[in-house]
Amino acid sequence: MQFGKDTALRLLIVDDSVEAAEAIVSGLRNSGIAVRPSRPENENELASLIASQTPDLVLAAREATLVPITKVMQAVDASGKDLPVLMLLDTVDDSRLMEMITLGARGILLRRSGEHVNVRVRQEWADLEARRSQRRLEAQIRETERRCDALIDSSREPIAYIHEGMHIRANPAYLEIFGFESFEDIEGMSLLDLIAPSKVEGFKQLLKQISKGEAPPRHETEARALDGSGFPAVMEFTPATYEGEHCLQVILRRQEVDPELAREVEELRQRDQVTGLFNRATFLRSLEDTVADAAQNASHHGLLLIEPDHFNRLLQDIGLDAADALVSAMGDRLRGALGADHVAARFGEHQFAVLVPNADHRRVTGLAETLRVAFADHVLETADRSVNTTVSIGGVLIGEKIASITAVLGKASQCLQSASGVGGNRTELFDPGAADRAEEERVEAWVQRIREALDADRFVMEYQPLIAMHGEPLEMYEAYLRLQGEHGELVPPLAFLQIAEEHGLLWEIDRWVVGKAISVIGERSRAGRPTTVLVKITQASLQDNTLAQFIQEKLAKHGADGNLLVLQLPESKVFTHLRAAQEFQAQVAHYGVRVGLEQFGVGLNSFQLLTHFNAALLKIDRSFMEDLGSNPAHQARLKEIAEKAREQGKTTIAEFVQDAASMSALFGAGIDYAQGNFLAPPGPAMDYEF
């Protein structure tokens, strides 16, 4: 399971000490887990939290008195939910272990060992997600089986399921073609009984071949109806499972036309009409067989997904009416660069797929690079013009470690998006046996791109207005960082900030952001439009003792008013770097610059932090905006935050506003400012009419 800021752990901590509980939350957040904690102070509150919030894990202190651990276990058992409980202890001995087992807790956490807490929480969370995934898959399988049954019954194709040569299922179309009235007439009947006597011996050999996995999936024969009349037929065989039993699915078609013509029709059914390559459905069947072979025989194969770079821009240049001509030309170029053993298909509107059978990492990588060069060095010819285009290629090496259709396509798509996102004209291959190497290469490409963006000033800002809910409107925007690609595309920070943090580049990015904001403030002020600008900085800036001096120099250079600059830090990062945050705030306050908290309200006691850190504004965590218009609990929490903030003279901001109902709830709660795409999306210009 992947742990990160996009996956929040809903943690319920039962402990008499708020400080001890907050220390656990901080330790988990510092290890990279996004935690959404709650802490009940009595049994009723515990029951309410379990019922309403559905936590992922419960950490219960053995010595807690507000809610004893026996009451915790009773509440969890009464809920009927899959809710793991871990017992918090200072020390452990045999009696504590036996008590843990007797109570039904899943394990022990040594409070004084942050590493032990981190490891055990991750293990239990991963186990919980695995159980949840299994339940979801089981439900999906049941639903899929139900739908398949319905589709088979309604299908006009004659379909039957055969187990050990006997019929165990047949749809109405199958019964009709042989003249049976109900399935009871055919249940348990041998498939050989429906084959013309002259064809029985050959059909027996075919069944033996099928049992060994050696026969072709399509076979022409002569079938025999209930009245003894025969008719030419084509049978297609597919391994299947019915009610837990391995069996054979048979699709039978009456062959009323010339066999050669039938083969031509079948060939047309398998092909894409624009490119002449296989279509998606045909390719998926080949991919399923390939993945099954990898799982059963430990073989290795390759899958490549190919897309032209900047396809929409190409269409603008050549016109929508030429889209098919462009795709056809790409199909021709792809076909010319492939070998006889490769399977190629048009997999999407402008996406192609190539299956490379019996191939190792070197061969698949080599083919991917050959295809990339084939497009980069070639001019595509359409009916009335020539087009230069490059392609991005994402691939995956299919083997035992990834013998799943979903996983194979998912990894190939991720690699394709990554190759395209780094600028295109690239190949990226996922090899489960060499994942570390592939990840290192991907990360290195991003690090190089970030450094180039800093050196060549390829970062840009987009601005989103903050709308006043009460009082006179002020011009206020939040600035969002974007990375500009080589061809003008904008990459959001989630794609690269984690890598920047791991390679010590955050402080440089923070400087660029702050410097750009100050220059915009100065420019707006000189134009007679004083504008407050909010920017996010990271915890890396708290360790940069030169940032305050940098701010002073930039304010002087651009003639900007420091009061119009607001720097934002996440609440959790301020809590874990409190001394550094206090010192930084004191330094920038000399120049009028304000510091605010974002992601506010998700801590165990967020307002307690304000007794140690004098934040100028509080941006409420986006989680409170989910279904705000119909969520009384979130509405009550927002009202509580707004009231307490108003008492302390703090400005409140709600981001990610989704609809008019949310705006109404925010107004009623007394929130000062709102922002979100519902009001106005971020854009390159500050042109909102306040």
Image (spheres, helix red, strand yellow):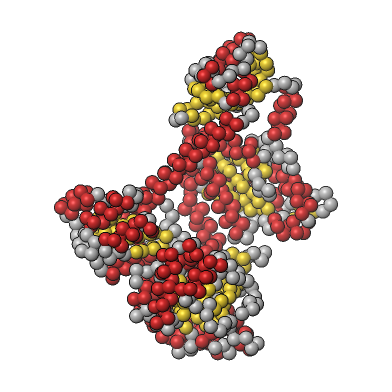
Give the camera-side residue of 358 and 14: 14
Asked whether residue 450 is in view, the answer is: no
**Rendered position, 197 above or below 314:** above
Estimate the x, y position of residue 257 in percent, counting from the top left: 74, 22
The foreground one among 575 and 103 is 103
User: Seen in the image, is 504 located left or right of residue 158?
Assistant: left
Is 308 situated above or below 147?
Answer: below
- The picture places residue 89, in percent across and down from the top left corner, at 22, 60
Q: Quadrant of residue 62?
A: bottom left
**Which residue is found at the position 53% from the left and 29% from the top?**
239
Q: Residue at x 68, y 48 (%)?
A: 349
Relative side of 502 to 204, left or right: left
Where does the image place residue 189, in percent across and percent down from the top left?
52, 16
**Residue 608 vs residue 409, the one in the foreground:** 608
Who is closer to the viewer here, 326 or 136? 136
Which residue occupies 53% across, 49% down? 411
Direction from residue 488 to residue 551 in the image, left or right = left
Q: How many marks?
A: 0
* Residue 77 seen in the figure: yes
Q: Is residue 467 above or below residue 101?
A: below
**Which residue is at a point 50% across and 35% down the rendered structure image?**
145
Q: Position of residue 256 (x, y in %)?
A: 72, 21
Residue at the extreme right:
384
Residue 690, image quadrant = bottom right
Furthest residue toward left: 95
